[in-house]
């Protein structure tokens, strides 16, 4: 069993806190993805797990061993770098086998392992080449191969696909998913790319400013974001956020937004919200659909036709712009006025502190 | 509005990655261990002697007997004694020859050639011009002592072109010995400077010259406003190297003139050697050594400042 | 630049003049070296009866075989050690880049402009105290120290350009610092090490001040140092002196001609960085 536990892990660079107390439990064999805006500390956290970065406070355990003071090489982790970090002076074969050689693995065993890994990654024909003679995708394979042969308990990936073009990224993504299936090892993966995060992860960890915002499966995060940050971060196009006030209605408090200009009250407020309070209303672009009687009306500013769906940028009478992703190929032109509707259940409410309000 | 489609929420430019001071305490420990042997060697044979030099410079000591504390008197001597001042002045006169000749000639060649020296001609040029850098300075000194000798090539040439009255024993001449020594240094450094400047000029974007010509620039303007600024770094390198070679010269003078006639060609390096090991004035020699070190530093500092900072 | 513009003709002319000026002293020495023994030759004049035997005599008089051996021993004592410890230090300093450690680097850099004359007097007493006066170690040990500023500076500049990721990848691959250094860093540093080796070889071989001050016996000196003694002894016999000088500078020139490209590159970079 080699899960991974972080207990109030902290990291300061000088006086600047970069990781501000992270708690995390990762089970054996899980595929965990760290996402978050640039500079939020994803790489730092990953490197602390790898042992490349001192831990200012807290505890990192791999399996049931606290590894704070264990050298990277003794932690049973392997890492794939964004830059690949292949040794330029060694052949692919030697790059992949370097770790085994250092560990004193007998030559025959080493050779078998290298060839196995090459077969898994379909790079047997590349073994004699130097890294300089490889394409980006091939280098990526070699970097992964180097990680595989060490048979680590935990694989760490820091934006491994970000230097590849879109098509190759798609292929490698599927290959990584397959690899995870085959090896069954714990994998921690840092990325900027939502699609990578959503498709690969068993569990996504959303970080912001050195703190965990939410941990959960991709759909959990999509359906039930814990706060405005996660709501805005997960899902694309981005969730629309509208300001609403709680006002007194005929049957108790209702939410009123500026959406319809005149101030239309269109949903009963959840219990416990005092009249006069303010909330943020989140509405996913995909929750909107054309509905002549719908409450959301406005002027079309921009239309993007993707074939399977139509993205519409709509200016509300208040001036705020929202995005709608309409299924199929809608006949809509800019400057046209349209009305959109949505289901009650698709509304997500957030309090003034940004935390989710559950009804 | 392209971010409507797949807005990665963090498509802002990435923060600038700080230099890799990343790394653990253990990394730093290991780094110290790697530096240690070099530092010990450096400390034992440079830093310690340097401190001793400073210490000796405060003494009156013949190197054998009792040393007396002498305060700053040695420095006062160095900065007031007319012979020593002349010796220091000699070094600065040498700078004129060691620096100006190679840099000006190098600039002329570079400005004229303004392209890469490729092919066989380039290889031959490089090989020949670097020869003086490869041989010991002592050999250069001997070769030129012979050139400047009364039956040497210089006089031979002068006689051949009808200037026999100019012929003389150059290195024994009170007026001409120092310039002659300067010529030797210029000869040694000429090739290096030329090659540095020629290489530097090939790095200047040729379209700059074309643009300047379209703007109506004369050759002189091109040189003044494109070549010179473009070569600032290389010129800085040449000046640095040649100034150090001039101020700290020893080998050439030792071989060609022994500092004579009189002290007309004596330089600080040679005088330190004489004072310490012939005249047994270790304190004075050390004070001169420290002054020499400081002179080199303050001569080089402005050059470095001028040529490196403003990029 | 295929078409020779008037400009490049002028340039060629200038360069050819420079080359002639560079070569004349050598030719003049050669013509003198071939003159009959005991005569006063003229500057540049092909002797009627070239005395190639002068070289043989100079070889014997200067005891060139022993000089070669001595210089080689000194180079072997200085260069490998200097390159090794400078490479290590360059690597270490490249890892200590934060402001807290900057002083260490600056201490090394300070030595870059230090004239050897500034420390030669105390070095004499230090070497004497170590009991090494008049041995080759009197040259070898101080030179190692004196070369450190440049060598360390040089190697550090190289290691700063090696991606930090490689170090980390090696660490994760299970390499100790020492193994990483030898198996990853040193192979990658080969060009820089090569240039440094060439420069240190030249500077050692041609070193003059230290042998003159610290070693009396010419047979324990470097080539250049021995040449000083040779001149002192045979300075009046011009043919012999010139023949000896040519012999003494022959080894480096021969090496230079063979490795012309590497030498030129090393000397140019050496100047730029130094
Ligand atoms: N060596 C360092 N010294 C000081 N601060 C640092 C250092 N390295 C990183 N930081 C800071 O730590 C924070 C987190 O950096 P980190 O590299 O973990 O971000 P990230 O989430 O991986 O970003 P990206 O998505 O751009 O890779 C950043 O604000 C960064 O500026
Ligand atoms: Mg990162």
Image (cartoon, coloured by chain):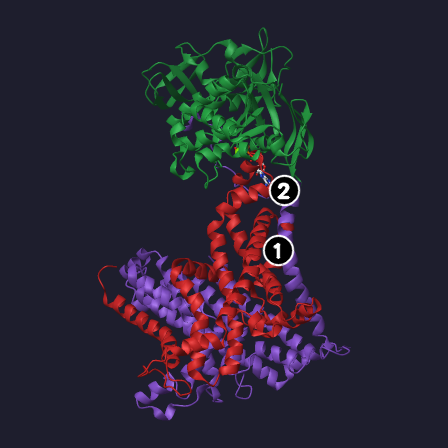
Disc 1, SS: helix
Rendered position, B82 above or below C87: below
Which residue does the image show at 47% across and 60% down from the upper left?
Answer: C272
Quarter that holds the C terminus of chain A: top right
Quarter that holds the N terminus of chain A: top right
Q: Give the colour in which the image draws chain A.
A: green
Label placed on residue C15: none
Q: Quadrant of residue B27?
A: top right
Q: Nearer the viewer, residue A1 or C76?
A: C76
Mark 2 lies on residue: B27
Q: Which chain is red?
A: C
Which residue does the image show at 58% across and 11% down from the upper left?
Answer: A269
Q: Earlier in the sequence, mark 1 or mark 2?
A: 2
Q: Nearer the viewer, residue A283 or B94?
A: B94
10 Å crowding of disc 1: few (<14), some (14-19), many (20+): many
Q: Quadrant of residue C128?
A: bottom right
Chain of the residue on which disc 1 is drawn? B
**Farthest residue toward the top?**
A251
Chain of the residue on which disc 2 is drawn? B
Q: Residue B215 appears at what percent x and percent y?
A: 29, 60
Q: Is any part of residue A317 visible from this angle?
A: no
Horizontal side of A332 relative to A57 (left or right) equals left
Q: Which chain is purple?
A: B
Same chain assignment for discs 1 and 2 = yes
Q: Residue B16 appears at what percent x and percent y?
A: 52, 41
Q: Is any part of residue A254 visible from this angle?
A: yes
10 Å crowding of disc 2: few (<14), some (14-19), many (20+): some
Mark 1 lies on residue: B38
């Amino acid at each position: 069993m080699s899960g991974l536990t972080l207990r109030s892990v902290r990291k300061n660079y000088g006086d600047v806190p970069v990781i501000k107390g992270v708690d995390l439990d990762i089970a054996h064999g899980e595929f965990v993805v760290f996402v978050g805006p640039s500079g939020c500390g994803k790489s730092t956290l990953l490197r602390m797990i790898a042992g490349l970065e001192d831990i200012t406070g807290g505890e990192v355990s791999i399996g049931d061993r606290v590894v704070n003071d264990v050298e990277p090489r003794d932690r049973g982790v392997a890492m794939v770098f964004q830059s690949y970090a292949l040794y330029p002076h060694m052949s692919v074969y030697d790059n992949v086998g370097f770790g085994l050689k250092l560990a004193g693995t007998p030559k025959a065993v080493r050779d078998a392992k290298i060839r196995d890994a090459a077969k898994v990654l379909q790079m047997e024909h590349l073994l004699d080449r130097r890294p300089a003679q490889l394409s980006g995708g091939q280098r990526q394979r070699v970097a992964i191969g180097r990680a595989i042969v060490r048979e680590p308990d935990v694989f760490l990936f820091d934006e491994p696909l970000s230097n590849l073009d879109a098509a190759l990224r798609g292929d490698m993504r599927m290959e990584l998913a397959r690899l995870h299936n085959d090896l069954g090892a714990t994998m921690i993966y840092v990325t900027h790319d939502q699609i990578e995060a959503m498709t690969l992860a068993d569990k996504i960890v959303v970080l912001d400013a050195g703190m965990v915002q939410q941990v959960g499966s991709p759909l959990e995060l999509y359906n039930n974001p814990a706060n405005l940050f996660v709501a805005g971060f997960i899902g694309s196009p981005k969730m629309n956020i509208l300001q609403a006030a709680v006002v007194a209605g005929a049957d108790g408090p209702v939410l009123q937004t500026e959406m319809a200009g005149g101030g239309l009250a269109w949903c009963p407020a959840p219990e416990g919200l005092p009249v006069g309070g303010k909330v943020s209303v989140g509405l996913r672009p995909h929750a909107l659909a054309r509905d002549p009687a719908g409450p959301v009306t406005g002027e079309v500013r921009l239309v993007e036709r993707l074939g399977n769906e139509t993205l519409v940028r709509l200016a509300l009478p208040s001036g705020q712009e929202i995005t709608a992703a309409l299924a199929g190929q809608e006949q809509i032109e800019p400057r046209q006025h349209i009305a959109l509707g949505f289901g009650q259940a698709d509304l997500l409410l957030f309090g003034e502190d940004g935390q989710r309000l559950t009804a | 509005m392209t971010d409507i489609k797949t807005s990665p929420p963090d498509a802002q430019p990435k923060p600038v990655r700080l230099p890799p001071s990343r790394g653990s305490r253990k990394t730093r420990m290991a780094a110290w261990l790697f530096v240690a042997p070099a530092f010990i060697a450096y400390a034992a044979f440079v830093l310690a002697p340097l401190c001793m030099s400073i210490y000796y410079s405060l003494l009156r000591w013949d190197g054998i007997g009792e040393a007396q504390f002498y305060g700053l008197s040695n420095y006062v001597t160095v900065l007031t004694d007319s012979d020593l001042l002349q010796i220091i002045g000699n070094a600065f006169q040498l700078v004129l020859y060691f620096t100006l000749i190679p840099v000006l000639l190098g600039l002329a060649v570079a400005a004229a050639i303004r392209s890469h020296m490729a092919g066989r001609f380039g290889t031959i040029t490089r090989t020949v011009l670097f020869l003086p850098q490869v041989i010991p300075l002592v050999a250069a000194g001997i070769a030129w002592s012979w050139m400047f000798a009364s039956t040497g090539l210089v006089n031979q040439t002068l006689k051949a072109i009808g200037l026999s009255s100019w012929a003389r024993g150059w290195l024994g001449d009170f007026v001409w010995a120092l310039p002659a020594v300067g010529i030797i240094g210029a000869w040694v450094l000429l090739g290096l400077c030329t090659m540095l400047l020629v290489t530097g000029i090939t790095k200047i974007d040729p379209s700059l010259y074309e643009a300047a010509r379209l703007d109506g620039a004369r050759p002189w303007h091109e040189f003044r406003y494109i070549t010179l600024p473009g070569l600032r770094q290389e010129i800085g390198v040449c000046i640095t190297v040649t100034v150090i070679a001039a101020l700290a010269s020893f080998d050439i003078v030792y071989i060609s003139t022994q500092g004579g006639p009189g002290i007309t060609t004596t330089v600080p390096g040679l005088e330190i050697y004489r004072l310490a090991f012939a005249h047994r004035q270790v304190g004075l020699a050390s004070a001169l050594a420290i002054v020499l070190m400081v002179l080199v530093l303050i001569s080089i500092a402005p050059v470095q400042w001028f040529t490196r900072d403003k990029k | 630049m295929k078409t020779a513009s008037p400009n490049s003709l002028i340039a060629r002319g200038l360069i050819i003049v420079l080359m002639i000026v560079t070569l004349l002293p050598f030719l003049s020495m050669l013509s003198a070296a071939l003159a009959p023994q005991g005569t006063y030759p003229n500057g540049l004049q092909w002797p009627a009866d070239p005395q190639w035997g002068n070289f043989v005599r100079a070889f014997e008089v200067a005891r060139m075989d022993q000089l070669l051996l001595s210089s080689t021993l000194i180079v072997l004592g200085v260069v490998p050690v200097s390159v090794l410890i400078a490479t290590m230090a360059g690597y270490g300093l490249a890892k200590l880049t934060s402001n807290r450690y900057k002083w260490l680097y600056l201490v090394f850099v300070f030595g870059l402009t230090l004239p050897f004359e500034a420390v030669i007097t105390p070095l004499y007493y230090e070497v004497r105290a170590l009991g090494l006066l008049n041995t080759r170690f009197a040259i070898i040990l101080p030179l190692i120290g004196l070369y450190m500023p440049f060598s360390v500076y040089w190697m550090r500049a190289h290691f700063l350009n090696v991606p930090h990721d490689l170090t980390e990848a090696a660490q994760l691959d299970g390499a100790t610092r020492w193994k990483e250094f030898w198996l990853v860093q040193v192979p990658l540093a080969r060009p820089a090490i090569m240039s440094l080796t060439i420069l240190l070889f030249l500077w050692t071989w041609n070193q003059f001040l230290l042998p003159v001050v610290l070693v009396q016996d010419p047979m324990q000196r470097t080539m250049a140092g021995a040449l000083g003694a040779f001149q002192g002894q045979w300075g009046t016999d011009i043919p012999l002196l010139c023949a000896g000088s040519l012999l003494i500078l022959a080894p480096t020139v021969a090496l230079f001609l063979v490795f012309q490209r590497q030498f030129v590159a090393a000397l140019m970079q050496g100047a730029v960085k130094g």
